[in-house]
Image (tube, grey):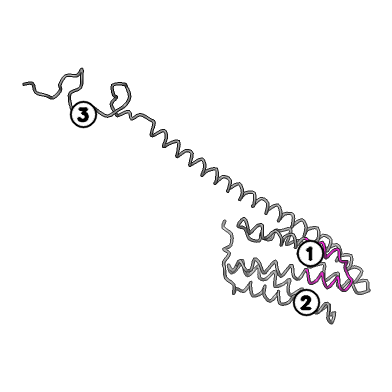
Amino acid sequence: MAGPVVSDRIWTVPNLLSMLRLLGVPLFLWLILGPQADWWALLVLALAGISDWLDGKIARAWDQASKLGQILDPLADRLYIFAALLGLVLRGIIPWWLMGILVLRDLIILGALPLLRHFGYGPLPVNFAGKAATLCLLYSFPLLFIAGYASIVGDVARIIGWAFALWGTALYWWAGLLYAVQGLRLIDQTRRDERADRTGLRTGSRDSDRARGHSADRPDPTAPETADGNPGAAPEGPDVPGLPDQGRTRP
């Protein structure tokens, strides 16, 4: 069965939802770091998650999948993750090393894009492990914000939030490893195809030269032989030594 058609359209409903989700990133970060209105920030994050789910459903139902959407959708997810990590770190809720581990993975993936483009490939599609990792991380951030409040609810939220954060971090790197394996396979396949093309061209050239050489040296079975036994031109006229005159009238 053929997959959904990916168009070059820009102004589609899913793309508009992705753009609105991107506009919510600075608002989300300001709510965390400015007035520290955590509940409003969590509302923005929840709306971003709903729009993320909604634009995927609309793109599939209305055949509005687009190349721009394939870029905007994961970009918005990564920016929300970065903004939430930055807010949690600056608020002293999570350590810097957790943010460093997650950002390092994205920097490696970003650095691999020029290599993929050199071999004719664009960004790789999001795999299931990447989607699961993003989901776990986006679940963990609200819980870790709630964990900042001293209460029984905060203690429970801290345990569950860290479980989601650590599991999401492991899946995030596993997804990155899968991207690396997929990219290396694509590059290896491209190189093998290029070598096969070059070998085919050289082999075809040699076969052509060999065929021309054989045709030049091969005797023509329809040509008569000369006196020395080699093929040659047919003798002109009817007088051939040793043969009677055929078709001639005697005087």
Judge the density around disc 1: few (<14), some (14-19), many (≥20) Cα neighbours within 10 Å: some
161 horizontally vs 198: left or right: right
Secondary structure mainly formed by the magenta segment: helix
Q: Which residues are magenta?
A: 82-104
Q: Residue furthest top?
A: 242
120 horizontally vs 129: left or right: left
Quick check: marks 1 and 2 in contact, CB under 8 Å?
A: no
Quick check: marks 3 and 2 in contact, CB under 8 Å?
A: no
Q: Amino acid at mark 1?
A: Val
Callout 1 secondary element: helix
The residue shown at (31%, 26%) is: 231
Give the residue pinned by disc 3. 236
Q: Residue furthest front?
A: 228
Judge the density around disc 3: few (<14), some (14-19), many (≥20) Cα neighbours within 10 Å: few
Q: Position of residue 219 (x, y in %)?
A: 35, 29
Label located before the other in sequence (3 or 2): 2
66 or 203: which is nearer to us?
Answer: 203
Q: Amino acid at mark 2?
A: Phe
Callout 3 secondary element: loop
The residue shown at (79%, 65%) is: 137
**Mark carried by residue 28:** 2
Judge the density around disc 2: few (<14), some (14-19), many (≥20) Cα neighbours within 10 Å: many
Which is in the foreground here, disc 3 or disc 1? 3
Up/down of 23 relative to 63, above or below: below
Label located before the other in sequence (3 or 1): 1
Task: Give the Cα separation between the discs numbered 3 and 2.
Answer: 102 Å
